[in-house]
Image (tube, helix red, strand yellow):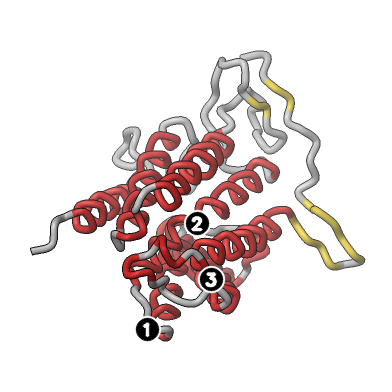
Amino acid sequence: MEGGVPFPNIDPVAFAIGPFVVRWYALAYLGGVLLGAAYGATLLARHALWRDNRAPFPPPAIWDFAFWAVLGIVLGGRLGYVLFYNLPHYLSDPAQIIALWDGGMSYHGGMLGIMLAMALFTRHHKGSILSAMDLLGAIGTIGLFLGRIANFINAELYGAPTTLPWGVVFPTDPDQVPRHPSQLYEAALEGLLLFAMLRFATNHTRALKHPGLVAGLFGIGYGVSRILVEFFRLPDIQIGYLFGGWLTMGMVLSLPVLLAGIALVYCSLRPAR
């Protein structure tokens, strides 16, 4: 297989000060939290968007939640990766569980972690947990976009070989063949497109007046996007395809997100009795 687009010469290390190294991947996590909090504050400040004109908590409180969010994402993401993707390895060497510098984070685990953090934080403020989940869905696409761009910069989680003109030859690929830039597919679908759809729902419809609706739309949008991209993305090498076919762990973990999204949309729009 010949051709393909050369990989852009982007150093995974954003900057270094002596032995202190900061990678784009870490900045993506930080940027996702800070930009998400800033955008979330604008939604919280518009009381008319929410049911009974009441946001789940005051706008300034979201900056306190940012700390909770980091803990939820990191702890949940790492625990999810350990449990879902490489449990035998970590059971054989438990000390590696805390070796975050060696990589290994699960988006689905991070999602559960930040949802738990949001539920506890909102309960403390005596707000609506479903409305808080709507807020989380509306701002979560920012972190998704930045995270997938960071995956591309790291030349990781790339796709299957392709003859399409935009196939990329990744420097970490031992075969050095053009591959689907599946990280960019996810950034476009789960990040940009889903953000635009949810932005329309929150700001131009009465979606936030129906607690759970925006969270449900996020679940549907993310689940469909991730499952579609999994057809082009290579599975994790230590797992491979499940049941000897085309099914991947990413599909398995995204299906409950999709089903939960459908259930939330149905329940939020169901007429009150």
Identity, as a three-letter code, of the amino acid under mark 3:
Ala
**Which residue is disc 2 drawn over?**
140
| Rendered residue at 42%/47% (across/down) | 204
Give the CA distance from mark 2 to mark 1.
Answer: 22 Å
- For this view, does 273 lie left or right of residue 110? left
x%, y% of residue 136?
Answer: 45, 62
x%, y% of residue 237?
Answer: 50, 44
Q: Number of callouts in the render?
A: 3
x%, y% of residue 190?
Answer: 48, 43
In this view, the residue in front, 173 or 3, is 3
Which one is earlier in the sequence, the residue at label 3 or at label 1?
A: 3
| Rendered residue at 64%/64% (across/down) | 34
Q: Is residue 30 placed above or below 60 in the rendered structure?
A: above
Identity, as a three-letter code, of the amino acid under mark 1:
Lys
Q: Secondary structure at mark 2?
A: helix
x%, y% of residue 171?
Answer: 72, 34
Q: Is residue 65 placed above or below 216 in the rendered structure?
A: below
Give the CA distance from mark 3 to mark 2.
Answer: 11 Å
In the drawing, what numbered circle is on residue 94?
Answer: none
Confirm whether residue 236 shows in the render: no
In this view, the residue in front, 183 or 249, is 183
In this view, the residue in front, 86 or 10, is 10
Identity, as a three-letter code, of the amino acid under mark 2:
Gly
Which one is earlier in the sequence, the residue at label 2 or at label 1?
A: 1
**Which residue is disc 1 drawn over?**
126
The 10 Å Cα crowd at callout 3, few under 14, some 14 to 19, many 20 or more, is many
Which one is earlier in the sequence, the residue at label 3 or at label 2?
A: 3
Confirm whether residue 235 shows in the render: yes
In the drawing, what numbered circle is on residue 69?
Answer: 3
Quarter of the rendering containing residue 251 = top left
Could you tell me which quadrant the C terminus lies in? bottom left
| Rendered residue at 44%/42% (across/down) | 197
